[in-house]
Amino acid sequence: MQQSPYGAWESPITVDMVAAADGRPGFLGTVGEELWWTEPRPEEGGRRALMRRKADGTVASVLPEPWNVRSRVHEYGGTPWTGVIGERGPLVVFTDFADQRLYAFEPDAGAEPRPLSPVGSVPSGMRWCEPLVMEEFGEVWAVLEEFTGERPTEVRRVLAAVPLDGSAAEDRARVRELTDDSYRFLTGPKLSPTRTTLAWIAWNHPHMPWDETELRVAGITVTGELRDLETIAGGDGESIAQAEWAADGTLVLAGDRSGWWNLGWKEPWGPEQGTVLAAEEEFAGPMWTLGMRWFQILASGDIAAIHGAGESRLGIFDGWERKLNPVEGPWTDWAPGLVALGDTVYGLAASPNTGYEVVEVDAVKGTTRVVAAAHEVAVDPAYLPVPEHRTFAGEDGREIHAHVYPPRNPDYAAPEGELPPYAVWVHGGPTSHVRAVLDMELAYFTSRGIGVVEVNYGGSTGYGRAYRERLRERWGEVDVEDCASVARALAAEGTADPARLAIRGGSAGGWTAAASLTSPAAQGVYACAVVKYPILDLSGWTGNDTHDFESQYVYSLVGPPEVLEERSLERSPVHHADRITVPFLLLQGLEDAICPPAQAEKLLQAVAGRGVPHAYRTYEGEQHGFRKDSTIVDAVLAEHALYAQVFGFAGPDFELELKP
């Protein structure tokens, strides 16, 4: 082993590897006996390709560039496609990102995709997700998000039907609305086994889907109308995250009335209900994208379920023995995208050594195998970081969960007595959590001698409702305090160099990173920060200053309108720029509708002339989060260059000018 200072180690993990590994497969579904899904293509402008695995095991992309199978409903999107077997093979209906219209596509018939839905009154103003092909009515039913004006909150959402013959492509009047818009948000339309009843989830502002939702049902008439609409579960402070029909016509649902998202059941038209499985574990999570599936009911009646406290493992619940049997395998995390085909379940699974792969589980035989998107070994695993799952003590002795990744490179050791620099990585959301799985961007830094700690601060999901509600009305306080507590603990125990601590995050994580530079709770902890597509002014992140989905989110995170302005003045970094004394890097997509560039520009104006070294890098064509390989490469190199300048080691061949 060579001796070299932390941060200056050479690594085989390149920025190109980081860009190539960005994103994961998603939106698994079946078309007949085939498995279909979407995959990211950073090298193709960040589009999502539609993939198909045939019965013989061959896998191929079915749509060339520039087709981009991605919905913009809620801006975060949702399930953008569905498919059935028709007279000429698979019939797939999908949303294309460019115009957000629905298209029908028959890949085996040699035809090009044809539009089904009309263009909206504003650009991309009619958006669709979670489609269902209703062949008996010659229609596709889906969640419709329709903008009635140019402002983000001038929008309505309904369940709607679009003719499969294309007659609505130029005629809005041919779009048939199935519900009214009395609910601001709808998701998860599911057909009963007899195709005579529809169930879905709905909620209204000011709630977010993890605060409170309702499970709705309606009968379907012979002419395709919905009748007898009613709420049968949820509400009154309960969040129902998913519902599925069992073969006997009951609904299995994941609700958190107990304080954890647990599995229960409900008769759709009667008072009967009960518990399927109760435990102090989560069997669902925050519904950031529409169509997330944490559980699936198998042909046998058993339930494949993702569950855990902090971690997300897959188990098969045996309904006869009332026992949850673990699915064995090398994977430590399963993403919420399960799909069942008979007694076989498909999902997306990863581990600290592998990215998300498409995994097949035979629930009868108990066997597992990777069937698509298999992890390709780009480097020796000895260069990959190994997570240490830690629980730290925070303010008032509260628990803080985190994943610690020490520097790791088999070719290098640091000089005796030197402590490594560390970066605190803050996840977005904030109602979310970070998973301890392979992240090539994280490995890029740890293999160069920079430690990373990912903090699931109070407010994170995965640990029950009480843990995630620690952040209620305390955003900018609990998150900042918890990250600082972890950073101080690592320094105090001799794991990290107290003079070389950084904090970085994107979106809500960008807020926490920036707030940590101005909050007294983190004073003197960090030597620099990386702030990506952030929220920086709380009072400027409501109503039409952001997208509709999160336009009232800040009221639960910070406080109702009557106190919001005061608390925004107290906590927002833009109002305390005089407290920023360390260098920072600001990264922003110029087409971000969730955290618009105006947020970043406010901070730049506030620090102007104050002598604080900083850099601002913007990216054309990027929305919320970076998807293009060129953007990802630039962002990683800029972050590396910042650490090199601030922490004092040799950095990448990249010019980063920090202007005062």
Image (cartoon, rainbow, N blue to C red):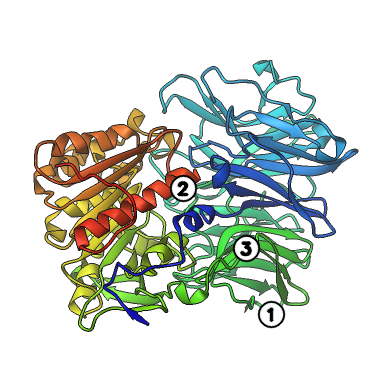
In 3D space, how far apart are the residues under numbered discs 3 and 1 (Cα atoms)? 30 Å
Name the residue rendered at 49%, 20% in the picture. Answer: 148
Is residue 429 at least partly visible in the picture? no
Locate the C terminus by quadrant.
Answer: top left
Residue that mark 3 sits on = 357
The answer to which of marks 3 and 1 sits earlier in the sequence is 1
Q: Position of residue 506 (x, y in %)?
A: 35, 49
Instruction: Pick the residue in front: 453 or 473.
Output: 453
Name the residue rendered at 77%, 74% in the picture. Answer: 364
Please name the amino acid that badge 3 sits on: Glu
Residue 546 position (above or below residue 16): above
Residue that mark 1 sits on = 321
Mark 1 and mark 3 in contact (Cβ < 8 Å)? no
Residue 619 position (above or below residue 8): above
Q: Which mark is residue 153?
A: none
- Secondary element under disc 2, as helix, strand or loop, is loop
Locate the N terminus by quadrant.
Answer: bottom left
In 3D space, how far apart are the residues under numbered discs 2 and 1 (Cα atoms)? 33 Å
Name the residue rendered at 59%, 39% in the picture. Answer: 70
Please name the amino acid that badge 2 sits on: Pro
How packed mark 2 is, by other alpha carbons closer than 10 Å (few <14, some 14-19, many 20 or more), is many
Q: Position of residue 147 (x, y in %)?
A: 50, 24
